[in-house]
Amino acid sequence: MVTNPSRVFGIGSDKTAIKKNYLAIVRKIHPDIVESDEKIVASEATAHLNKLYKSACEQIDKGTYGEEIENISHKSTSSYTQENENFENEEPIFKLNIKGKIVKIYNQIFEGKICDVYVGLLDDKKVFLKAGKIEESDELLQNEYQILSRVKHRSLPSVLEMIKINCNLALLENECVGQPLSEILKKLNHGISQNHVMWILERLLEVTGFLHSNMIVHGNIKPETIILDTKNHNASLVGLYFGCDKSVGVENYKVKNKIYSAPEISKLEEVNPRSDIFSIGKIAISLLNGNEISKVCPSSTNRELANFIEKMAKQDSCSRPYDAFKLWDELREVRTKIVGNKRFEEFVI
């Protein structure tokens, strides 16, 4: 059962934004709008949601909203920024003046077909500049800007500004601490232990459930769009320019990555929450060094955990779970059975 309201309503200290997210969720689960055989469950879910909303308002008043309540021993307070890139002895490759504030850009860290990504500093804080480079990039970056302007979560980037550079749109976003999962996997040819896969899954299901509760489907979850903070055991989702915001009737962006996209995307069918769940399940199988073709976990994987993951990666969309939050709760129970109360295990790359 979710007990930290920020996991449901997102980060921030604005009661208006929290209330907006609360109302968006309650409109979908209230017993008055569900079938008769689901009213009992809906009543329990609504009652719990109301408690979380009350708790969120109380925490905002106390200034404690958004603090993580899970007790993780050995949790590091240092960040990837502080340890790896302080830019003290570097000259910026270019500077931007945005509303009177100087953004110093130091390095290009990614070159893509749609946009290039640069890292820099704004007020001594690390930021990323996502600069479009093709005609179609303006529409995609505008889409990401609209999504990230509407929802806030500790496992999503926050967009700071949208600007024009060389006639193309660019987004200035805050740092998601960590490294792309794709880069970590290059260093770990043997895969990742099931204990680490479980907390990675937990974080991904949590933030994906949050997006889905706000009628947003990511649509392109893959190791390159997952930022893993191995020290603090967090996972963030980036690359939302292909995201589908159902609340405003945005047309589905049909994007297919070769390995992790759901089958319905290849068929140009509608992107839906089950599409994201498929991607997460297949990534988990890959992390465990399972069979990506048959979508089966290795025999060494705990059977209950393997069943949990494999049902997420079913070929048929209707056979997959739909509710990421429900999966998140279920996984926490499975994880407790496997590792007990010892939740933290150092992730060594």
Image (spheres, grey):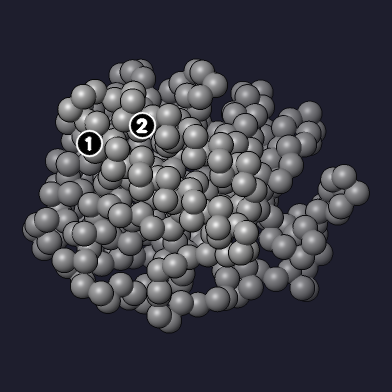
Q: Quadrant of the N terminus?
A: bottom left
Say which of 327 and 281 sits in front. Answer: 327
Q: What is the C-alpha distance between the residues marked 1 and 2?
A: 10 Å
Farthest residue toward the bottom? Answer: 74
**Residue placed most toward the observer, 329 or 42:** 42
Say which quarter of the image contains residue 185: bottom left
- Image location of residue 71, percent across then percent down: 40, 74
* Residue linked to disc 2: 30
Q: Is the residue under label 2 in contact with that under label 1 (CB below 8 Å)?
A: no
Q: Is residue 198 left or right of residue 241?
A: left
Q: Quadrant of residue 125?
A: bottom right
Q: Which mark is residue 173?
A: none
- The crowd level at tag 2 (other Cα within 10 Å; few <14, some 14-19, many 20+) is some
Residue 230 seen in render:
no
Q: Is residue 303 visible?
A: yes
Query: Residue 235 location, x and y as percent?
Result: 44, 57
- Identify the element where label 2 is drawn: loop
Residue closer to the observer: 39 or 128:
39
Residue 58: percent from the left, percent from the top?
A: 55, 58
Q: In the rendered structure, which disc, 1 or 2, sits on the residue that comes first in sequence?
A: 2
Q: Is residue 136 left or right of residue 191?
A: right
Q: Residue at x 56, y 41 (%)?
A: 19
Type of amino acid under label 1: Ile
Q: Count neighbours of disc 1 (C-alpha within 10 A) and say few if under 14, some if 14 to 19, many if 20 or more.
A: few
What residue sits right under mark 1 in the picture?
Answer: 40
Q: Is residue 78 left or right of residue 104?
A: left
Q: Which residue is pictured at 32% across the width and 75% down the height?
A: 345
Q: Report x, y in % for residue 109.
A: 61, 53
Vertically, is 114 above or below 342?
Answer: above
Query: Disc 2 marks which amino acid?
Result: His
Quarter occupied by residue 241: top right
Residue positioned 17% across, 45% down in the render: 310
